[in-house]
Image (cartoon, rainbow, N blue to C red):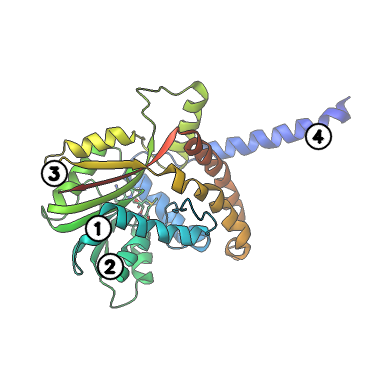
Amino acid sequence: MFEFLAPFFLISLFLLACSFIWRITARKYISSGTVASAYDAWTQDKLLERLWGEHIHLGFYPSENKNIDFRQAKVKFVHELVKWSGLDKLPKGSRILDVGCGIGGSSRILSKYYGFNVTGITISPAQVKRARELTPAGLNCNFQVMDALDLKFEDGSFDGVWSVEAGAHMNDKTKFADEMMRTLRPGGYLALADWNSRDLREFPPSFFENLVLKQLLEQWVHPKFISIKEFGNILRTNKNSSGKVFHENWNIYTNPSWYDSIIEGIRRPFAILSLGPLAIVKSIREIPTIVLMNWAFRKGLMEFGVYKCRG
Ligand SMILES: C[S@@+](CC[C@H](N)C(=O)[O-])C[C@H]1O[C@@H](n2cnc3c(N)ncnc32)[C@H](O)[C@@H]1O
């Protein structure tokens, strides 16, 4: 009898140990300093960049052609958000602020294809260093370490403000919106994309959904998620916004990213293998979070919000 049960017992013990390690190595949000450390580590170990390229955001998979790879879909995402938000109406040379710029993937596209003069800011010093290394001389892009909740720019300094998937890391969503709208000039364009939850006050989460949300927050340094409607209202009532705020849920276009982000590891195995055994463990460690994200976005517990408004 014991011989029959032993494999089940060992497998359960192994799974229990893995989930314990997964929980104790979670990256909980404590302050923007914890966000900075997490992104410094993700940048320095090079795993994210080798695997997913220079963009740390989801891709856009058009309804008529979902057969594009993750990296192409990310570039497409930037162009789609530019078009949807109206940022492309700005003339060349316009000053754009990229809030939470990562290693500058979007900033370089905005500068190279649209001729904008881009300033990217991130809380992570390692990202600024890498963004500078990746930016060819002559491209109008500069990068600085700065907290999005305390922007060191004069009021109305920018013709456009761009922010992709940074808001979920902000503990004060109102301050986040205030700072972006303050630095946007009257009549300027705001283009923003973020991870949101569904309206949890109107549709409270079940016990299981609560467990999932807790992991989505704690694994990737997120203090809290709010709904698209709530953030839309924050922008709408901001004293520097024109009050006309448009938002959409792009789950349908971005959801294929989750499995595609895992498939990238199979498509480019040497991207991980060349970084050594620890990189293999680190990438496997992220798979449960990616699977949970995929589940949450597919079920509508999470929503991919895009927002546009004028200053
Ligand atoms: C998911 S990454 C997105 C990066 C980039 N927008 C892109 O699309 O490639 C989130 C970014 O937000 C930045 N971030 C998070 N909290 C921040 C804060 N308080 N101030 C400035 N940047 C912040 C992170 O450092 C990181 O660069």
Three-letter residue code for mark 3: Ser
Q: Are marks 4 and 1 in contact (CB under 8 Å)?
A: no
Residue at 46% x, 44% y: name it.
252
Local packing at callout 4 (Cα closer than 10 Å; few below 14, some 14-19, many 20+) is few
Residue at 29% x, 49% y: name it.
192
Front one among 224 and 3: 224
Residue 165 location, x and y as percent? 36, 48
Earlier residue among tags 3 and 4: 4
Three-letter residue code for mark 2: Tyr
Front one among 97 and 59: 59
* Above or below, comparing residue 31 to residue 47 in the picture: above
Residue 278 in sight in this render: no
Q: Quadrant for residue 170, please give it.
A: top left
Three-letter residue code for mark 1: Leu
In the picture of the structure, the residue carrying the numbered disc 4 is: 7
* Above or below, comparing residue 260 to residue 251 in the picture: below
Q: Secondary structure at mark 2?
A: helix
Residue 117 location, x and y as percent? 22, 67
Q: Is 66 displayed left or right of 139 in the figure?
A: right
Residue at 56% x, 39% y: name it.
22
Earlier residue among tags 1 and 2: 1
Q: Are marks 1 and 2 in contact (CB under 8 Å)?
A: yes
Local packing at callout 3 (Cα closer than 10 Å; few below 14, some 14-19, many 20+) is some
In the picture of the structure, the residue carrying the numbered disc 1 is: 87
Could you give the CA–CA distance between mark 1 and mark 2, rounded to whole angstroms? 9 Å
In the picture of the structure, the residue carrying the numbered disc 2 is: 114
Q: Secondary structure at mark 1?
A: helix
Q: Quadrant for residue 111, please give it.
A: bottom left
Could you give the CA–CA distance between mark 3 and mark 2, rounded to whole angstroms? 24 Å
Residue 205 location, x and y as percent? 44, 24
